[in-house]
Amino acid sequence: MRCSASAARPAPPEDGTINVKTLAAISTHAEKPFVIEELDLDEPRPDELLVRVDAVGLCHTDLAVRGMWPEGVPIVLGHEGAGVVEAVGAAVTDVRPGDAVLLSFASCGVCEPCGAGAPAYCTRFQEANVSGGRLDGSPTLSGSRGPVSGAFFGQSTFARYALSSRRNAVVIDPDLDRTHLAAFGCGIQTGAGAVVNVLQPAPDSRLVVFGLGGVGMAAVMAGALRGVRTIVGVDLSTSRRETALQVGATHVVDGGDPDVLGVVRAITGGGATHALDTTASPAVVRLAAQALASRGTLVVVGLGADVTLDVQDLIGGGKTVRGTIEGDADPQTFIPQLVEWYREGRLPMERIVTTFPFTDIDRAVAGMRDGTAIKPVLVFGD
């Protein structure tokens, strides 16, 4: 791993262009260490912002994409960025340099779902978020060996500086702790949104969350802030189960118990009215569907292998199984709501965030994988 000095703040030269050198963590293989090196970042287009990243969450989606990305093709991942705007494109009129922002997923803004306030289902979602470039196919990053895939979720914030479209940047109070808020751009938005926007459990509901990483913990917190009286967290990790009890779970179950289904049914008095799977494990998704009470609903959020469900069980119980992207959220309205709940102490992020220096990204990955870091957040020094 080669580490260069921190990138200097960009300064526009006399011709008005902005030339930025940015320190970035480059992935070339799912199982190889990230390479830390300096890259060239394109100047902002008219609808883009140049953001100096202070903190960026590490999400399971980053690791999943590493596993699916072509081997040897360099890419800068990172999609839970938080920082300060350094420059804005000519068409951006409502954000100024110096504004603090959280960065979320990208969307085209003109298709039918975007027009209906459902940008997570943008018809060009794949192009906007995981194509390796902008919607028009142009790159945002390059290195000494040529182009580097970027614009991941419209940001690629495993880097000191990043470009973001105006649509996926949300302005926040600069006095808030951005290490706690960075994950609002994806993981927390997904977990909380799955509960608040999709499942919508009532206080007398019985909510079961399978997998207590960052997304699962956000779902537990969201259940608690909705006043759900029975919230069950299921996970293999003892420490994660203990943390779940601290952030709103009323019960926890060891995911390694051979009778998980029986234990969940006993706690919930016959089954869950609402359930969320964050594990993407086919066996766990199947179990989660079986754990539903009659007419219960299961929401799945993880990327994984194909799942086989018991159709007779679904039909006989009138059960619903559906997916969600980003918790069905519109970042421009939902992230401010998350921020408000955080201000009120109803999203205790300090209990689940573990910070790592940016250059220790591989240690953060290891912490996520072994369960010692529920929500790793990479931070940059000055």
Image (tube, rainbow, N blue to C red):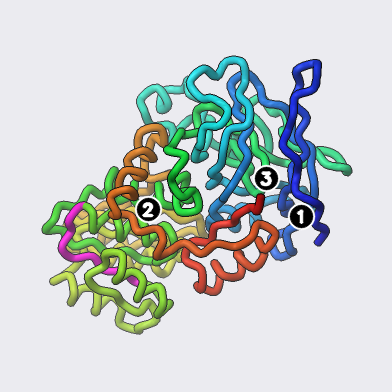
Residue in the foreground of this view, choosing between 216 and 334 = 334
Badge 1 marks a residue whose secondary structure is strand
Within-10-Å neighbours for mark 2: few <14, some 14–19, many 20+: many
The amino acid beneath tag 2 is Gly
Q: CA distance from mark 3 to mark 1?
A: 11 Å
The amino acid beneath tag 3 is Arg
Badge 3 marks a residue whose secondary structure is loop
For label 1, the residue is 36
- Residue 21: x percent and y percent? 78, 39
Would you identify the image quadrant in which residue 205 lies? bottom left
- Residue 241: x percent and y percent? 36, 74
2 or 3: mark nearer the eye: 3
1 or 2: mark nearer the eye: 1
Q: CA distance from mark 2 to mark 3?
A: 27 Å
Task: Say if residue 315 shows up in the picture.
Answer: no
> In the rendered image of this protein, does residue 192 appear above or below residue 106?
below
| Badge number at residue 160 | 3
Q: Residue at x 31, y 64 (%)?
A: 247
Q: Residue at x 74, y 64 (%)?
A: 32
Residue extent of the magenta highlight: 226-234
Would you identify the image quadrant in which residue 234 lies? bottom left
Would you identify the image quadrant in which residue 116 lies? top left
Q: Are marks 3 and 1 in contact (CB under 8 Å)?
A: no
For label 2, the residue is 191
The amino acid beneath tag 1 is Ile
| Badge number at residue 57 | none
Is residue 228 covered in magenta?
yes
Q: Are marks 2 and 3 in contact (CB under 8 Å)?
A: no
Q: Are marks 1 and 2 in contact (CB under 8 Å)?
A: no
- Residue 292: x percent and y percent? 23, 63
The residue sitting at the bottom extreme is: 258
